[in-house]
Image (cartoon, helix red, strand yellow):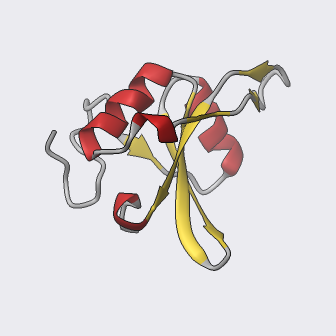
Amino acid sequence: MNRDADGLGERDDPLRWREFVLRRDGMIHAMDGGLWLHRHTWFDTPMAHLVCTNRELLLAYGASVGLPVHRLQVKPLKDPRTGERRDAWHWDLVGRFLPPIV
């Protein structure tokens, strides 16, 4: 799958991830089935979580960039709109899998 230099792909690309200034907005996007890229550091190493409630969409993204399926992690998250816990999955993206900051 072709990706633009910023990693976002075409606007209608279902594997297009988004970043948000506010964590709450990213959580809502992920709860609605979108791909949320959440950057952070771990022991001074830049990384990100790619989060979504749609496991199949995350698996498709992983296949498109060469992530091994066994690295997909499940972690229930609280929907900020309702307070209800929902199943969600994420990839840990680090090294060559971490999209550049644009």
- The quadrant holding residue 21 is bottom right
Q: Name the residue nearer the viewer: 67 or 20.
A: 67
For the point 37% across and 57% down, the residue is 97
For the point 31% across and 28% down, the residue is 14
User: Is 94 located above or below residue 18 in the figure?
Assistant: below
Which quadrant would the N terminus be assigned to in this image?
top left
Residue that lies at the very extreme toward the front in this rendered image: 70
For the point 48% across and 36% down, the residue is 70
User: Is 47 located above or below residue 75 in the figure?
Assistant: below
In the rendering, at what x and y percent does residue 40 appear?
62, 64
In the rendering, at what x and y percent does residue 69 appear?
42, 34
Looking at the image, residue 23 sits to the left or right of residue 94; the answer is right
In the rendering, at what x and y percent does residue 77 appear?
74, 31
For the point 54% across and 71% down, the residue is 46
Q: Name the residue nearer the viewer: 67 or 87.
A: 67
Which quadrant would the C terminus be assigned to in this image?
bottom left
Asked if one can make out residue 15 in the rendered structure from this viewpoint, the answer is no
Looking at the image, residue 61 sits to the left or right of residue 34; the answer is left
Residue that lies at the very extreme toward the left in this rendered image: 2
- The quadrant holding residue 78 is top right
Residue that lies at the very extreme toward the bottom in this rendered image: 44
Asked if one can make out residue 30 in the rendered structure from this viewpoint, the answer is yes
User: Is 48 located above or below residue 53 in the figure?
Assistant: below
- The quadrant holding residue 6 is bottom left
Looking at the image, residue 5 sits to the left or right of residue 17; the answer is left
Q: Name the residue nearer the viewer: 66 or 50.
A: 66
